[in-house]
Image: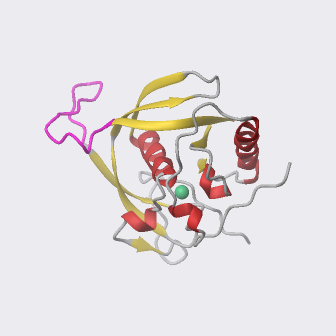
Amino acid sequence: MAKLNLVPEDDPILSKDVKASGKLTKKQKRSLSSMVKKMDDLPHAIALAANQVGFDDLRAFVYRSGDKVCTVLDPVIRWSSLQDPDEILEGANGEAIPKSSTQWEGCLSCPDKEYLVIRPTMIKVEFTSESGARKRDTLFDLAARIFCHEMDHLDGVLIKNVSRQSRDPQVEEPIEATSPMLFRVPKSA
Ligand SMILES: [Zn+2]
């Protein structure tokens, strides 16, 4: 299997809306497996969308969960806390939860800067898992942020297109532990 490479930041495939895959062909299954394998080369990456490595016929992303790399195919966001401003979000102890959070994000596809991005704190999603079953789930905070970041990739949107503020991670203060940083490419020595 040919080795996968990240496409460059200006590659038009990154601005392309990737169509739903449906039932995968053998070739698409191989592409998905090669994305899982590619995560071994990217130990600091949390997730990777298919078009970031040149597949425009696969609406899928992979993400790291502990030691495992999981796959998400044909993801859909059914509800987002940003869409419904009147609904009150309640935490496990009845506390009010803000509906959005703004954090610095990094991206393998725009590696030189970090971007401030607003995301919902809660989303309800549907996707096809590696078993082929269609699943529904509710995601919060960092998991919701990762899912939205990868969905944006598959819709042809990069964080630099949705953010009004960027910064150079080489110059700025390191991000506090309370601001999780996603998908950051480690600076090579
Ligand atoms: Zn990204």
Q: Position of residue 148 (x, y in %)?
A: 43, 47
Q: Quadrant of ligand 1?
A: bottom right
Relative image position of residue 25 (x, y in whole percent): 71, 35
The residue drawn where x is 58% and y is 73% is 10
Quadrant that contains the C terminus: bottom right
Q: Residue furthest left?
A: 86
The residue closer to the viewer here, 20 or 100, is: 20
Residue stretch rendered in magenta on the structure: 79-98
Q: Residue at x 60, y 41 (%)?
A: 63
Percent from the top left, x then y, of residue 137? 43, 26
Expressed as whole percent of the image width and height from the top left, the position of residue 49 reads 59, 50
Q: Quadrant of residue 23?
A: top right
As drawn, is 140 to the left or to the right of 93? right
Up-down: is 134 above or below 42? above
Left/right placement of residue 163 relative to residue 46 reads: left
The front one of 48 and 45 is 48
Q: How many marks?
A: 0
